[in-house]
Image (cartoon, grey):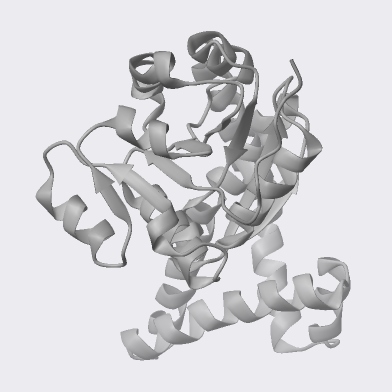
Amino acid sequence: METLPISAESFKVGFIGAGKMAESIARGVVASGMLPPNRISTAVHSNLNRRQVFESFGVNVFSSSEEVVKESDVVIFSVKPQVVKKAITEVRSRLSKDKVLVSVAAGIKLKDLQEWSGQDRFIRVMPNTPAAVGEAASVMSLGTAATEEDGALVAKLFGSVGKILRADEKMFDAVTGLSGSGPAYIFLAIEALADGGVAAGLPRELALGLASQTVLGAATMVSKTGKHPGVLKDDVTSPGGTTIAGVHELEKGSFRATLMNAVVAAAKRSRELSQS
């Protein structure tokens, strides 16, 4: 039978899992005006605090995951990788080909998601933690029965909390190494820049504010100008100046190679975890 399209005007979204990622996506969807909160639901079994968080911005909170699935056209499994199989199998009898299923669990392949659910209309999304502030870098891959329309709908949902790109699932370990783990690398860099500022004589608060804004500004220049980062670096390194002196120290410390190695190591670890 033909897969029924999801109505963009009336569809409902349900989250299996009521953690920080589900909250970030739900808040982003509501803030963007894509959906009113009464068309979003989740289930909270015992944690009163999580129930209050979702109810505070109008989301429907049920007592069971089965109720969430029953009420939803798009079901997003937003749980830890080690419990995603249990979460899916618990609601398997409620799933159907008329629902678009989405997983944000790191390292869990589409073939496993489809096998556990008995459904092929699945989309895998790899977001990252800046979703909490509306600046996620997400990547998605479509399952065998997911349509282009399904992909566009899910891209719009996740686009409310940042940017979403599309890639073949075989690239997801590398995606994890770069954008999934990448925020931690940048947090380290910001901390180190701030420490450098303190070492050079700045008060801690001023140093941290300058470091974080400098990273934000540099990233914005790359994304908005379309210029290669190397060109932007050259634009600010005048002959015999302060910046080239600093860049020279970074090169002596293998700064670029260390970042490259971090991405490759994290990608390798992701591959190991997905095979275990």
- Residue 88 visible in the current orientation: yes
268 on left or right of 76: right
The answer to which quarter of the image holds residue 206 is: bottom left
Where residue 93 appears, as percent x and y from the top left, is 41, 13
**Which residue is at a point 58% across and 63% down the rendered structure image?**
160
In front of the other: 195 or 136: 136
**Which residue is at a point 20% across and 51% down the rendered structure image?**
50
Where residue 151 appears, as percent x and y from the top left, is 72, 41
Where residue 69 appears, as percent x and y from the top left, is 40, 32
In front of the other: 88 or 210: 88
Q: Is residue 135 above or below residue 49?
A: below
154 on left or right of 33: right
Marker count (numbered): 0
Where residue 231 appears, as percent x and y from the top left, is 88, 73
Q: Is residue 268 above or below residue 9?
A: above
In front of the other: 47 or 189: 47
Q: Is residue 15 above or below residue 30?
A: above
The answer to which quarter of the image holds residue 250 is: bottom right
- Residue 253 visible in the current orientation: no
